[in-house]
Amino acid sequence: MRLALGEAAQAAAEGEVPIGAVVVCDGQVVSRAHNRREQDADPSAHAEFVALVDAARALGRWRLTGCTAYVTLEPCLMCAGLMVNARIDRCVYGAPDPKGGALGTLYDVSHDARLNHAFEVEGGVLADECGGMLRDFFRARRKKREQ
């Protein structure tokens, strides 16, 4: 999660919402990414989405069995859906997302019996640090807008 936090800090430095992600497979980091929606003008450029696509390319396969995604914020429906489709084994996230969390907060895509894959989820890892980075980012953004 510390590596994902580093990616989130890089996103903030670039003016992006500070969310970072890392994909680990068989004990090795195979990809890392941060939000790039503004830079890429791409609504799908969420940190975990980019990291999962990069992991698939690095591994040369779309099935990411044996992989764990570490994300600083609970994934949204789009990213949780990609995790199902990519067949990851596990997702570890930092802060819960009360407005869009799809791994237990608003929805639970990870264990929906109607879908063809389920995966383990562990939330709350370094949650204060992950959430604090987001709160600080948006507080600064609001303050700048007020000036």
Image (cartoon, helix red, strand yellow):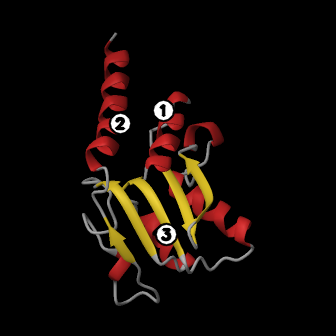
Left or right placement of residue 79 versus residue 39 in this view:
left
Label located before the other in sequence (1 or 3): 1
Check disc 2 and give the amino acid type.
Answer: Met
The quadrant of the rendering that contains the C terminus is: top left
The residue labelled by disc 3 is: 68
Q: Residue at x 64, y 65 (%)?
A: 55
Task: Specify few, some or many for label 3: CA neighbours under 10 Å numbering under 14, 14-19, or 20 or more.
Answer: many
The residue labelled by disc 1 is: 12
Q: Residue at x 40, y 60 (%)?
A: 75
Task: Specify few, some or many for label 1: CA neighbours under 10 Å numbering under 14, 14-19, or 20 or more.
Answer: many
Q: Nearer the viewer, residue 46 or 58?
A: 58
Q: Secondary structure at mark 3?
A: strand
Whether residues under marks 1 and 3 lie with C-beta atoms below 8 angstroms apart, the answer is no
Q: Position of residue 37 (x, y in %)?
A: 56, 44
Check disc 3 and give the amino acid type.
Answer: Thr
- Identify the image quadrant of residue 134: top left
Alpha carbon distance from label 2 to label 1: 9 Å
Check disc 1 and give the amino acid type.
Answer: Ala
The residue labelled by disc 2 is: 133
Q: Position of residue 102 (x, y in %)?
A: 34, 66
Whether residues under marks 2 and 1 lie with C-beta atoms below 8 angstroms apart, the answer is yes
Residue 108 lies, with reference to residue 38, above or below; the image says: below
Q: Position of residue 93 (x, y in %)?
A: 37, 59
